Image (cartoon, rainbow, N blue to C red):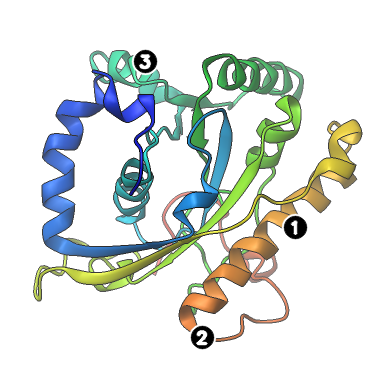
């Protein structure tokens, strides 16, 4: 995979976790990465993948680690208050999801963005916020968290798509499909989404909506290439179908 980033060569808490996770995921998935060179080896970034299986984070984490960066995710704020778990999350640089008022959330986002830039870290943010509700597992309507974080610090947003994870663990499936082992999963990383014209309007709802649309379009285009299919012309909107936009979807 080329030269390694300092994030994956110097000692850290990621190493003992990687020693366990990498072999286990390697038994279940044969991950092929396209576009690895598009994820910056140094500096901050926001990585925005599609999301259709509860096994997705492990696939994404392994792919990011193999490229040479530490896989840091946005995590629920409540997890940071759990003994031991919270300490690990903080020590590995995970970022809490803001669940506060709009003003407080904006302030927290700015602080988080500045810390990413200061420490040259990347973060993985699922712009859909939860598993897609689209019946055919295409990306659904996105939320603005990823672009807010990026615009606040002038951080590049890198789209990612993957396909094949559903053979290991289907959407809302209980347990894993273990056989056959090493199911193929293809991960593709795209070019940074151009949001430069929206930078000076980072606090405007219209600009955030436009930025989110561009990111979701980029993810969808990557997934179309992986699936060799065309996504629906209209992106799935859970609210229009009477569905909850967060949490597990009732069957």
The answer to whether residue 141 shows anywhere in this view is: no
Q: Earlier in the sequence, mark 3 or mark 1?
A: 3
From what the image shows, is residue 30 above or below residue 93?
A: below
Q: What distance separates the C-alpha of mark 1 from that of mark 2?
A: 22 Å
- What x and y, as percent, mark residue 208? 80, 43
The residue wearing badge 1 is: 213
**Residue 193 horizontal/vertical position (percent):** 70, 51
82 versus 58 height, above or below: above
Q: Mark 1: give few (<14), some (14-19) or many (20+) Cα within 10 Å.
A: some
**Residue linked to disc 2:** 228
Q: Residues within 10 Å of mark 2 (few under 14, many from 20)?
A: few
Residue 149's spot in the image, x, y percent? 66, 31
Left or right position of 188 against 116: left
- Quarter of the image with the C terminus in it: bottom left
Q: Find numbered disc 2 in the image and state the secondary structure of the residue it sits on.
A: loop
Q: Residue at x 74, y 27 (%)?
A: 152
Residue shown at 48% from the left, 36% from the top:
41
Which sits in the foreground, 207 or 198?
A: 198
Q: Disc number at residue 81?
A: 3
Which comes before the other along the chain, label 1 or label 2? 1
The secondary element bearing badge 1 is classed as helix
Number of marks in picture: 3
**Disc 3 vs disc 1: Cβ atoms closer than 8 Å?**
no
Q: Quick one: SS at disc 3?
A: helix
Residue extending farthest to the bottom is: 229
Left or right of 73 in this view: 202: right
| Mark in the foreground, 1 or 2 | 2
Q: Which mark is residue 103?
A: none
Relative to 172, 75 lies left or right: right
| Earlier-in-chain disc, 3 versus 2 | 3
């Amino acid at each position: 995979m080329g030269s390694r980033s300092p994030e994956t060569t110097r000692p850290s808490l990621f190493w003992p976790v990687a020693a366990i996770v990498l072999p286990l995921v390697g038994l279940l998935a044969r991950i092929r990465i396209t576009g690895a060179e598009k994820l910056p080896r140094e500096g901050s970034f926001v990585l925005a993948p599609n999301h259709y299986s509860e096994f997705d984070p492990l696939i994404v984490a392994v792919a990011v680690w193999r490229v040479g960066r530490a896989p840091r995710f946005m995590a629920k704020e409540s997890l940071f208050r759990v003994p031991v778990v919270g300490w690990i999350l903080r020590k590995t640089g995970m970022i809490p999801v803001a669940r506060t008022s709009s003003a407080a959330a904006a302030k927290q986002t700015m602080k988080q963005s500045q810390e990413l830039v200061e420490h040259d870290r990347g973060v993985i943010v699922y712009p859909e916020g939860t598993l897609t509700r689209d019946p055919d597992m295409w990306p659904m309507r996105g939320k603005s968290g990823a672009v807010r974080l990026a615009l606040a610090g002038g951080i590049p947003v890198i789209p990612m798509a993957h396909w094949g994870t559903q053979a290991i663990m289907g959407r809302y499936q209980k347990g894993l499909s273990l056989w056959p082992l090493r199911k193929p999963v293809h991960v593709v990383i795209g070019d940074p989404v151009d949001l430069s014209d929206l930078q000076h309007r980072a606090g405007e709802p219209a600009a955030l909506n436009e930025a989110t649309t561009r990111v979701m379009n980029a993810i969808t285009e990557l997934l179309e290439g992986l699936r060799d299919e065309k996504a629906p012309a209209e992106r799935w909107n859970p609210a229009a179908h009477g569905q909850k936009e967060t949490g597990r979807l009732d069957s």
